[in-house]
Amino acid sequence: MVNQALRASTVSRMTAETTISVALTVDGTGQSDVETGIGFYDHMWAAFAKHGRFDLTIRAAGDLQVDAHHTMEDVALAVGQAFDEALGDRAGIVRMGDALVPLDEALVQAVIDISGRPFAAVNLAFTGERIGEAPTEMVAHILRSFATTAQITLHVRMLAGANDHHVAEATMKALGRALDAATTLDSRIAGSVPSTKGTLTT
């Protein structure tokens, strides 16, 4: 369900592996309520919402007895879909945004183009296999999953970092800040789609 006036969307996703619900308001205040069954993953989305100024509610029930993969992937797909729906035809948005975020020794950059062309280039390095119950290999995977359904071009790169928790958290903060910048409405082009081809959805 989409409320275009508020740039808000609710998404439900159900498979044999997961049941996901997402409620998103793009022009929010950074409030979040996230329950995925994976503690650090909850923390990642809370950081994303807080620093992107998005209001975000996530409920996920997945086959965690197998592993965290399906739950983490499907949540990212659902949040990306919610952004895609909430932004509608993209009229009036800035379209591109970038953020460089430090967290102690870690430094991560995220660059976004709300282009209608799903693509993700992710360059992150982790030293361990897990952060809490979240596999570190899934961080790049959820970024690619999110970019696919949000229909954005996303570049993420780690410029410095030694602590896996810091790298992952800085990544989500950078993603949130870059997306906030890109989704900001520009009063100079109100009602106009910022593309020479006239569309950002096909």
Image (cartoon, rainbow, N blue to C red):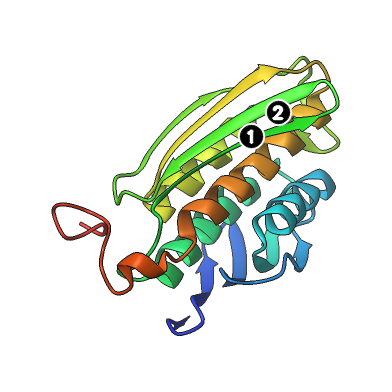
Near mark 1 (Cα within 10 A), the count class, few <14, some 14-19 or many ≥20, is: many
Position of the C terminus, as image quadrant, is bottom left
Q: Which residue is mark 2?
A: 136
Whether residue 128 sits left or right of residue 142 in the image: it is right
Q: Residue at x 72, y 18 (%)?
A: 126
Whether residue 25 sits left or right of residue 84 in the image: it is right
Q: Which residue is mark 1?
A: 139
Near mark 2 (Cα within 10 A), the count class, few <14, some 14-19 or many ≥20, is: many
Q: Determine which quarter of the picture holds residue 75.
A: bottom right
Q: Amino acid at mark 2?
A: Thr
Relative depth, front residue between 52 and 77: 52
User: Residue 84, relative to residue 155: is it above or below?
Assistant: below
Residue contact between numbered discs 1 and 2, judged by CB atoms under 8 Å: yes
Q: Secondary structure at mark 2?
A: loop
Q: Amino acid at mark 1?
A: Val
User: Residue 55, relative to residue 126: is it above or below?
Assistant: below
